Image (spheres, helix red, strand yellow):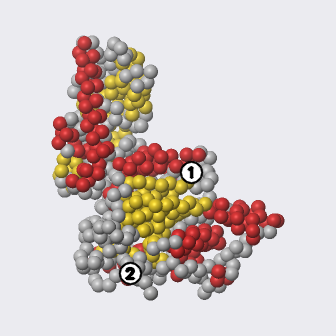
Amino acid sequence: MVVGIAIGASGQRFSGCNCHHHFIGQEGSFKGLSSLSGPLKHESGYRNQNDQKVAVCSVHPTSHATLQCLACIKYNVAAPKSFHCTPNCFTDAWQHHRVLHDQAKAAEKYRSVAEESRLNSGGSTSNTGESIGSKTVVDKSGETWFEIGRSRTYTPTTDDIGHILKFECTAIDATSRAPVGNLNTVLTSRVIPAPSPAPRRMMQVGFDARGQFDPDGQSAFSGTFSVLSYNILSDVCASKEQHSYCPSWALSWPYRRQNLLREIIGYRADIVCLQEVQSDHFDEFFGPELEKHGYDAFYKKETSEVYSGQPNSINGCATFFRKDKFIFLKKYEVEFKKAANSVIESVVPATQKKAASHRLAKDNIALIVVLEAKFNSNGSENSGKRQVLCVANTHINVEEDHVDVKLWQVHTLVKGLEKIAASGDIALLVCGDLNTVPGSVPHVYLARGKIDHLRPEAVFDPLGVVHPLSKFNHQLPLVSAYSSFLRTVGYNQSLEQQKRRMDPATNEPLFTNFTRDFIGTHDYIFYAADRLTVESLLELLDEESLRKDTALPSAEWSSDHIALLAHFRCKPKIRN
């Protein structure tokens, strides 16, 4: 009977009745944060800062630790997992953090039993001549190894950098506790320092009601919230052919998912909108992991399988929100294929329906979540009228020459949002990868509310579903959050740097998608300007810093898109 699975240093697995697990590293000592150059689980730990070890928060690795769990010290929990940045951080993580204590106590009991078994057997020897349980061993080739752990998993430390790790697994009889079978061994590549990009800063573009600003983007004054939008590049889309410039270990999903999680958690956004999330990755990783950090979530997958043909590889959109800041009210799911089929049935002639379906009926979706904030529009957390937010998260059709399809999908989403907005006093947000560049017809329609000034030939319309263009109009006061960079007055060196990363012709970033084949903006956060105002924005990355790795993804940034983050303040609705 298999009672446990040992995860090897290179991701391989061994199973048996019971197992002794040994991690052995070549002798030596190096400094810096470590990560295997392969698909290893990447944990929070120590960061190399000015040649000194600095404790960082195990939950928010971009923050320095200010407290350490004493119970972790008592139960010999790995030190990097014991640090937290604030008392609130520790409190929020407690439900899952205390599991570490239980696991450590169980591991200690297991080690005691294993050690007793070893002593009773007279210090058994493996079939390679290495003495199990010794601190330093020499193998048959004369290589000296230093034992660094006995557990099912191991996270490399700073001392492992530059060295090869060896994982050994020996099955033992559950009754006699004696070793049985052969010794299984896995060697890793040399441990390399983990890439550690400089944290992106929140940049002030507005002041709060008191004329003050929190440089960390975490205003203590109520009535504010932050929204993150991020296309994380799904595993099925991260191909070695398309991203050959990215090291294979940095392109692997086990590495990327941990790097993405660390980045996302580090932003501490109140609402998180992710695109290109595979259904299995949501169920098995992002959903459970973000739940540990106080988020609730909803997910909507696309309506058909992607090219891989695997059901679990279906991409979708995931929306997370902090349970301590919002109450869930309602959810809407938009399937553009279903809406397209209705249009085709009623508008397109029978002889053209097949061709129309192939062009217009795409698998893209939108996920709309309506939330009630636990504060009102004046910022008070006392009883009174609450602030309601409607957050749309979408991923629009990718085909470059299908402008008519993109426009129709955006229009379909907007018309649905208009109905929601008309149902009550609601502030709107539209986040996502629109796969449309600034100044294009779909972008102009969303930002200006109409496109009747454009010539008909601006949109190729083989199906006759988007002409006349005059019918495309909406009354939603939507504004792109990042346009606030160019509307901010006053001189500030950091702000001027951000303005140089904006396109003054479109009031949008020069790029949010940075690959070898395409550099441009596809990602946006639009907000209702009558109900919200932008206080701060996550700084944009500069092209020069990304070109050192050719393009995205890279070892530092694990998506081919960059994350967008805006900090908003609610404002009372002005009534006529």
Residue 432 visible at all: no
Q: Which mark is residue 382?
A: none
Q: Which mark is residue 486?
A: 2
> Dot 1, crowdedness within 10 Å: few (<14), some or many (≥20)?
many
Amino acid type at circle 1 is Ile
Task: Give the farthest residue toward the right.
Answer: 351
Q: Looking at the picture, how far across and down is residue 417, in whole percent?
A: 54, 70
Q: Position of residue 370 (x, y in %)?
A: 47, 64
- Horizontal and vertical percent position of residue 452: 62, 85
Q: Amino acid at mark 2?
A: Leu
Q: Residue at the location (32% across, 74% down)?
A: 378
Foreground of the two, 569 or 426:
426
Q: Is residue 174 left or right of residue 209?
A: right
Residue at the image point whose x is 32% and y is 22% from the top: 140
Q: Is residue 481 above or below residue 491?
A: above
**Residue 464 percent coordinates (x, y):** 72, 74
Residue sitting at 70 percent across and 62 percent down?
Answer: 341
Q: Disc 2 on helix, strand or loop?
A: helix
Mark number, residue 314: 1
Asked which secondary structure carries label 1, the reply is loop
Q: Residues within 10 Å of mark 2 (few under 14, many from 20)?
A: some
Task: For the N terminus, give its image quadrant.
Answer: top left
Label 1, label 2: how far apart the Cα atoms are: 38 Å
Name which of mark 1 and mark 2 comes first in the sequence.
1
In the picture shown, does residue 511 fall above or below 47? Answer: below
